[in-house]
Image (cartoon, rainbow, N blue to C red):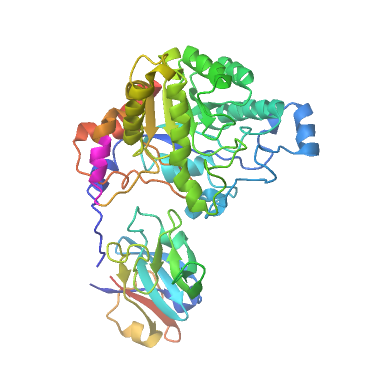
């Protein structure tokens, strides 16, 4: 495992997502209310690109006729077959036991820390006064 | 860690296999793409009166499709336009990386099911010209479907004869929701022309017959439409068998497209059982219904049923016969099947090759 600086935090505003390649792996990074989460950009069902999915919420129902729309902005829906995954954990909502999108730990670090390392920042010029998205792969 | 309980053994062995994709949907970039092949009379007509389909008061498809244009969100061409409207992007995203060596085009939303029969015929003919000009002449891997105005069988047969022998056309395309069940005599000229032209007849799910899309009325939900393709396709196929299509046209090949296939064995079992008791009603059938199905019908794979455990599919495929299945992705539609993931089962390499390519080459004679 190594820690990689992939972008300044300003590159992914809250509610947005972006695709990065880290150690040859396609990883979608999401900004969920200022916190960053990483997910292998390959849907565990058939391989769809999760970064191309819409960010949505969970529609839950305890009984027919009653609906609760919860966790808006916390769920990504695969652009192919519509499987839904928790952005924080990669957990699938239609098959929580059997299927999970691979999650990667992502943090936001101040530039001053990033400059000291040990981080891998192959292509990102780091400035002390900015914050950076750091992923552990 | 990635908790991946579904077996993924296919990935390494199939991703490099040459494959046939027997259900690709080319889309028009603009609503005017067909205009170069439309007589001015019908352009004026469409401008003035529109092109209403046999679908009550509605426009567009009967049910909303859950993804834009019923297509993958990651399949929008970089140069703009609908998913499936760019040959270069289709090549880059699908045909090249998936090593598609034979791709069958099934244009939907052309003129099939348009209520005005002459407008339907004009739109279908323009669609066929468009397939050659924009697709098959620019990529030799792609083969076109003769799109026909099936509710006007004589015009449909004429369209088939027009393209018969043209190397770019691989099949005749019907939709599953017709005004009458598919075996009805009104459609026989289509089967006759297709048999004479040695072109298989593909019956693709969906369409605009005018009747409710289930046999008990209009359902509330899109999931019912998706699931119901199996039922409507069974009704169509049952009609073809019992009305004697396969007895009358013994060389006709029929391909059921995008309606699943796991229903085929129990349908054959039911037909055989009931036919033995009601044989006198259909004395024109000389073989068991299952024998006609086994002789003259194929199924495309997408959308594959996904039983748990997945190995149950091996039983189904064994009952049907491995030679009955034609691999299809449905690109660029949202329920696309990825060839690297579509058959995650331990099967002999010869069966895998037939499933992904050999069966299609045999049916289409390529």
In this rendering, position of residue B39 left or right of residue A9: right
Measuring from the top left, give residue B305's x and y in whole percent. 34, 45
Residue drawn at (61%, 16%) of the image: B158
Front position in the image: B200 or B88:
B200
Measuring from the top left, give residue B21's x and y in whole percent. 40, 35
Front position in the image: B323 or B78:
B323
In this rendering, position of residue B233 left or right of residue B124: left
Determine if the magenta segment contains residue A87.
no
- Point out the image quarter for the N terminus of chain B: bottom left
What's the magenta region? B309-317
Front position in the image: B284 or B365:
B284
In this rendering, position of residue B19 left or right of residue B349: right
> Would you say residue B228 is visible in this rendering?
yes
Where residue B322 sits, quadrant-wise, is top left
Where residue A35 sits, quadrant-wise, is bottom left
Relative to A15, is B47 above or below? above
């Amino acid at each position: 495992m190594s820690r990689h600086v992939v972008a300044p935090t300003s590159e992914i505003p809250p509610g947005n997502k972006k695709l990065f390649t880290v150690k040859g792996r396609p990883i979608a990074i999401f900004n969920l209310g200022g916190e960053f989460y990483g997910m292998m950009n390959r849907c565990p069902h058939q391989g769809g690109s999760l970064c191309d999915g819409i960010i949505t919420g969970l529609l839950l129902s305890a009984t027919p006729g009653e609906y609760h729309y919860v966790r808006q902005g916390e769920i990504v829906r695969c652009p192919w077959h519509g499987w839904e995954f928790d952005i924080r954990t990669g957990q699938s909502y239609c098959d929580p036991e059997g299927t999970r999108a691979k999650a990667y730990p992502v943090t936001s670090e101040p530039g001053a820390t990033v400059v000291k390392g040990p981080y891998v920042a192959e292509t990102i010029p780091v400035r002390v006064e900015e914050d950076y998205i750091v992923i552990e792969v | 860690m990635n908790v991946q309980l579904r077996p993924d053994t296919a990935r390494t062995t199939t991703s490099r296999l040459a494959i046939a994709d027997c259900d690709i949907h080319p889309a028009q970039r603009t609503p005017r793409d067909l205009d170069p092949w439309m007589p001015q009379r019908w352009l004026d007509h469409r401008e003035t009166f529109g092109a209403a389909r046999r679908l009550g008061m509605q426009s567009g498809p009967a049910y909303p499709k859950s993804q834009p244009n019923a297509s993958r969100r990651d399949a929008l061409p970089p140069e703009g336009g609908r998913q499936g409207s760019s040959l270069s992007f289709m090549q880059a995203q699908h045909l090249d990386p998936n090593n598609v060596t034979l791709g069958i085009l099934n244009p939907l939303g052309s003129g099939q099911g348009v209520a005005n029969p002459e407008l339907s015929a004009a739109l279908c003919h323009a669609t066929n010209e468009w397939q050659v000009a924009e697709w098959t002449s620019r990529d030799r891997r792609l083969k076109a479907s003769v799109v026909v105005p099936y509710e006007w069988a004589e015009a449909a047969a004429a369209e088939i004869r027009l393209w018969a022998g043209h190397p770019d056309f691989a099949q005749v395309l019907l939709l599953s929701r017709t005004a009458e069940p598919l075996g009805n005599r009104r459609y026989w000229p289509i089967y006759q022309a297709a048999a004479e032209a040695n072109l298989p007849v593909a019956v693709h799910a969906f369409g605009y017959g005018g009747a409710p899309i289930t046999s008990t009325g209009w359902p509330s939900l899109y999931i019912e439409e998706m699931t119901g393709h199996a039922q409507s396709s069974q009704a169509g196929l049952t009609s073809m068998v019992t009305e004697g299509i396969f007895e009358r046209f013994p060389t006709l090949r029929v391909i059921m497209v995008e309606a699943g296939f796991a229903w085929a064995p129990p349908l054959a079992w039911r037909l055989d059982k009931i036919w033995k008791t009601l044989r006198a009603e259909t004395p024109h059938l000389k073989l068991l219904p299952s024998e006609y199905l086994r002789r003259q019908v194929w199924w495309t794979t997408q959308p594959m049923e996904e039983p748990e455990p997945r190995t149950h599919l091996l039983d189904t495929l064994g009952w049907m016969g491995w030679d009955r299945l034609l691999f299809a992705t449905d690109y660029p539609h949202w329920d696309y099947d990825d060839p690297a993931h579509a058959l995650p089962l331990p099967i002999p390499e010869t069966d895998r090759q037939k499933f992904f390519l050999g069966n299609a080459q045999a049916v289409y004679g390529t």
